[in-house]
Image (cartoon, grey):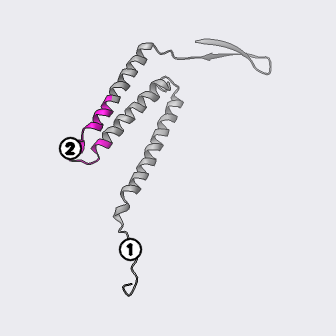
Amino acid sequence: MSTHNQHSGQGEVEDVIHTHHIIEPYVYYRVFGILFLLFFATIAVAFFDLSKMTNWPPANIVIALIIAFVKAAVIVLYFMHVKYASRLTQIFVVSGMLWLIIMFTFTFADYFSRDWIPQPGSWTVPGGR
């Protein structure tokens, strides 16, 4: 923690306290290990056909997206220092993720529901031409 004296325009002296959280190197080593394990998990999911094992066609995609979400969360928390940031910063990060989830939900709902409405066939010329 360090204090700095700053002068305002009116000659008053204000004490401003800046706090910075110092992360120990072992935390970064653990984060590296976690990201490395998740990298190998992503490769393993790519080599196994989970849809045949589970009888659920999008199994590989869902598992790969879950792993990707966990990797992104670890990167945001530790490398972007959101874990040690103010509560307001954490609220903005969470609200951004919620907005992204809402947008993906609406996009995929539109994409998957397109086959529900029958599409017209090709144009036919009256008279059999």
Could you tell me residue 36's position as x and y percent?
36, 25
Could you tell me residue 98's position as x and y percent?
45, 41
* Point 38% across, 35% down: residue: 68
SS type, badge 2? helix
Nearer to me, 19 or 24: 24
- Left or right, 3 with respect to 127, comes to right
Nearer to me, 83 or 3: 83
Q: State if disc 1 and disc 2 touch (CB < 8 Å).
A: no
Rendered position, 45 above or below 12: below
Could you tell me residue 47's position as x and y percent?
27, 37
Could you tell me residue 61's position as x and y percent?
32, 43
Q: Quadrant of the C terminus?
A: bottom left
**For the residue carrying disc 1, how many other residues have a C-alpha within 10 Å: few (<14), some (14-19), or many (20+)?**
few
Magenta-drawn segment: 40-61
**Magenta highlight: main SS:** helix
Taking the view exactly as shown, the residue that stands out farthest to the front is 129
43 within the magenta span: yes
Q: Amino acid at mark 1?
A: Ser
> Where does label 1 land, which residue?
122
Q: Quadrant of the N terminus?
A: top right
* Point 46% across, 43% down: residue: 100
In this rendering, the label closer to the viewer, 2 or 1: 1
Taking the view exactly as shown, the residue that stands out farthest to the right is 10
Q: Amino acid at mark 2?
A: Thr
> Where does label 2 land, which residue?
54
Disc 2 from disc 1: Cα separation: 38 Å
**For the residue carrying disc 2, how many other residues have a C-alpha within 10 Å: few (<14), some (14-19), or many (20+)?**
few
Nearer to me, 25 or 85: 25
SS type, badge 1? loop
Residue 113, by quadrant, is bottom left
* Point 30% across, 38% down: residue: 46
